[in-house]
Image (cartoon, rainbow, N blue to C red):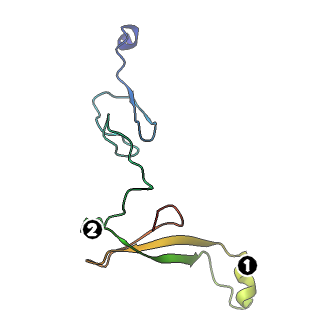
Amino acid sequence: MIFKLLGLEMTWTCENCHTHIDDDAFEVCWNCSCVRGEKPVNASTAALCCLRCDIPLTFIGTKEFHEGMRWGVLGNLAEFFVNKEQLDMFACKHCAKVEFFLAGKHPH
């Protein structure tokens, strides 16, 4: 409270996600892991890299995943009422690790 009266606030705002960080001792945003004072990273131009090998991932395709149980008696008619999530699938050529992302959120 006395710091606010003197004009010495102990807070900062992340330039990447605009999260308000209450403690000046933290140099990294807890929400997006952006370092304090660095320019925001443009996610649309950043290449997706393998977390193990640190090499670019290869786009495999967009896959639809069925949510819920199968309605065997009703066949394909019941598929109209079931939610299907579309996910973009990327794979590492080196270690064969596969990662999924929301469809259309990353350039291929």
Q: Which mark is residue 80?
A: 1
Q: Secondary structure at mark 1?
A: helix
Q: Position of residue 99 (x, y in %)?
A: 40, 70
Q: Position of residue 27 (x, y in %)?
A: 28, 35
Q: Is residue 67 left or right of residue 12?
A: right
Locate the C terminus by quadrant: bottom left
Mark 2 or mark 1, earlier in chain: 2
Q: Is residue 46 left or right of residue 74?
A: left
Q: Residues within 10 Å of mark 1 (few under 14, many from 20)?
A: few
- Residue at horizontal 45 percent and vertical 73 percent from the top: 89
Q: Position of residue 16 (x, y in %)?
A: 42, 41
Alpha carbon separation for disc pair 2 and 1: 39 Å
- Residue at horizontal 49 percent and vertical 71 percent from the top: 88
- Residue at horizontal 41 percent and vertical 44 percent from the top: 31
Q: Which mark is residue 54?
A: none
Q: Secondary structure at mark 2?
A: loop
Asked if labels 1 and 2 touch by Cβ distance under 8 angstroms, the answer is no
Quadrant in which residue 70 is drawn: bottom right
Q: Nearer the viewer, mark 2 or mark 1?
A: 2
Q: Which mark is residue 55?
A: 2
The residue type indicated by label 2 comes to: Ile
